[in-house]
Image (cartoon, rainbow, N blue to C red):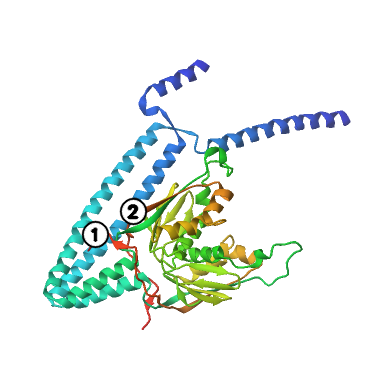
């Protein structure tokens, strides 16, 4: 009875050890191979085709859009020539389009490039993006730029408008519902000295991003920087003007 | 048997289509495709909008009333910019410092509301589809800065004291969930000990942005085409 028990225990013990090793090897393999695993290149070729199809379709749509926008512009301009009232209305519309973010703009400003820590400084683990998971650093940076008088801001060419959200969805960081990925390029129009100083202040946002997150930050001042317009339609489903 | 498998692998590798690529390449492709598709959807929205507008303008042109069509357009852009007071269903969020006793040796900062807390809550409301947001009666627009300094908060260059009252118009259930659901930032703050409350309402009013906007540095990019 006793002998039997010891033998069984030893066997169970051995099996446990082997199983444990198998688990740990498996776990390590899965962990390491995320983003390093292998796929047949056929899949890559399929995706390449899918991508070029999407790019062609987008260009085609963009051309159509330009055609119709042109037509609309012609209608408005022909009316503007005939009436001063219409002309002043058109000027007013342009003013509010600029404020809402529907126009490409340019002016003095700065550009901030934010890159994930270099491989040897990245303690976050397997292939994760530090800046994506800590996207509230971007919220904070935008807020500081606004406090320093920024007149327009974009992140990876997504214009920051009143309704812009930054949303970590799975493996993507969505801005204005468009997936973006590092490196992040933040552009801001305003007094470039003030904007830069607000970011570079001692123990400020850039210091925090460098020291606490090991992010790589580069700031450049520009006499003239372009910021793209917001490219979508704003439709209110719930909100109505107060009567 | 072993050589059989080896032969199979060599054969596979010999033909170009069966070469092997890292998962990262596949992943990068997928990300770019998702981005292209999202941008395509936006262009489609703009296209539909343009076509609708052309019909509307042609209709008004025939009746000799382009002015009316332009005034409508003006109102739309004003609303998009945050320069119109809006009302609709939504949520009212109240946020203030926690009033529980500190645990011995605990940093009092844990119980205070910081800029980043308000920024995260506002961002979460936008993710949940908020169409208009105000903070202590000031409209949150693209150039609004939120600055919490001790007992006060500064937004749009005006100073307010606690509590922080955030109003948002949108689907009330989504907005409430964005603050109260487990795992959200709002819920986390509540667990730490701050005061966080979110109540839905059938009618929330969000005021217009009141400050004068005068651009000193920004110019319209003349190279771009304007509708």
Instruction: Assign a secondary structure to mark 2.
Output: helix
What residue is at 45 percent from the left and 38 percent from the top? B24
Instruction: Assign a secondary structure to mark 1.
Output: loop
Closer-to-camera residue (B63/A223): A223
Instruction: Give the labeled residue for mark 1.
Output: B222
Q: Above or below — where is B86 with respect to B114?
A: below
Residue A182 percent location from the top left of the image: 45, 47
Chain ID at mark 2:
B
Instruction: Note whether residue B135 is visible.
Output: no
Count of marks, rendered view: 2
Residue A198 percent location from the top left of the image: 49, 59
Query: Pointer 1: residues within 10 angstroms few (<14), some, or many (20+)?
Result: few
Q: Above or below — where is B78 with respect to A61?
A: below
Residue furthest to the front in view is: A193
Q: CA distance from mark 1 to mark 2?
A: 24 Å
Closer-to-camera residue (A13/B83): B83
**In the visual, does B114 lie left or right of B44?**
right
**In the visual, does A60 lie left or right of B94?**
left
Closer-to-camera residue (B45/B15): B45
Q: Quadrant of the N terminus of chain A?
A: top right
Instruction: Note whether residue B15 is visible.
Output: yes
**In the visual, does B108 lie left or right of A215?**
right
Of the numbered discs in the image, which one, if any, rests on residue B23? none
Query: Pointer 2: residues within 10 angstroms few (<14), some, or many (20+)?
Result: some
Residue A239's image quarter?
bottom left
Residue B60's image quarter?
bottom left
Instruction: Give the labeled residue for mark 2.
Output: B39
Residue furthest to the bottom in view is: A243
What residue is at 81 percent from the left and 28 percent from the top? A7
Residue B58 percent location from the top left of the image: 15, 70
């Amino acid at each position: 009875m006793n002998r039997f028990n010891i033998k069984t225990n030893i066997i169970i013990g051995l099996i446990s050890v082997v199983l444990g090793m198998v688990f740990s090897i498996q776990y390590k393999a899965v962990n390491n191979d995320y983003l390093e695993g292998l796929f047949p290149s056929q899949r890559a070729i399929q995706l390449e085709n899918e991508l070029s199809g999407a790019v062609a379709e987008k260009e085609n749509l963009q051309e159509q859009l330009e055609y119709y926008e042109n037509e609309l512009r012609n209608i408005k301009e022909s009316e503007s020539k005939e009436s001063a009232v219409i002309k002043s209305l058109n000027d007013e519309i342009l003013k509010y389009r600029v404020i809402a973010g529907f126009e490409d703009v340019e002016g003095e400003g700065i550009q901030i490039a934010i890159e994930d820590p270099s491989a040897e400084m990245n303690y976050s683990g397997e292939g994760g993006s530090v800046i994506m998971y800590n996207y509230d650093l971007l919220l904070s940076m935008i807020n500081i730029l606004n406090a320093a008088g920024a007149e327009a801001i974009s992140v990876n060419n997504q214009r920051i408008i009143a309704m812009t959200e930054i949303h970590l969805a799975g493996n993507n960081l969505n801005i204005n519902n468009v997936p973006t990925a590092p490196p992040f390029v933040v552009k801001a129009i305003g007094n470039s000295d003030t904007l830069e100083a607000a970011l570079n202040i001692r123990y400020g946002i850039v210091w925090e991003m460098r020291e606490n997150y090991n992010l790589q930050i580069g700031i450049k001042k520009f006499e003239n920087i372009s910021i793209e317009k917001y490219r979508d339609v704003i439709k209110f489903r719930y909100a109505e003007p107060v009567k | 048997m072993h050589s059989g498998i080896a032969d199979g692998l060599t054969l596979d590798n010999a033909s170009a289509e069966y070469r092997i690529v890292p998962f990262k390449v596949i992943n990068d492709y997928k990300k770019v495709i998702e981005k292209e598709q999202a941008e395509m959807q936006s262009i489609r929205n703009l296209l539909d909008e343009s076509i609708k507008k052309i019909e509307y303008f042609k209709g008004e042109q025939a009746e000799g009333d382009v002015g009316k069509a332009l005034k409508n357009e003006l109102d739309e852009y004003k609303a998009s910019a945050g320069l119109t007071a809006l009302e609709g269903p939504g949520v009212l969020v109240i946020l203030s410092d926690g009033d529980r006793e500190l645990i011995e040796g605990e940093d009092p900062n844990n119980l205070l509301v910081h800029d980043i807390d308000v920024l995260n809550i506002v961002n979460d409301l936008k993710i949940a589809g908020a169409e208009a947001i105000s903070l202590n009666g000031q409209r949150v627009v693209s150039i609004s800065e939120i600055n919490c300094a001790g007992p006060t908060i500064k937004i749009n260059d005006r100073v307010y004291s606690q509590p922080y009252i955030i109003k948002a118009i949108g689907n009330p259930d989504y907005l409430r969930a964005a603050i109260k659901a487990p795992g959200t930032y709002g819920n986390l703050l509540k667990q730490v000990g701050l005061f966080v409350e979110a109540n839905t309402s059938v009618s929330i009013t969000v005021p217009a942005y009141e400050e004068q906007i005068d651009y000193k540095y920004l110019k319209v990019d003349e190279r771009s085409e304007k509708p």
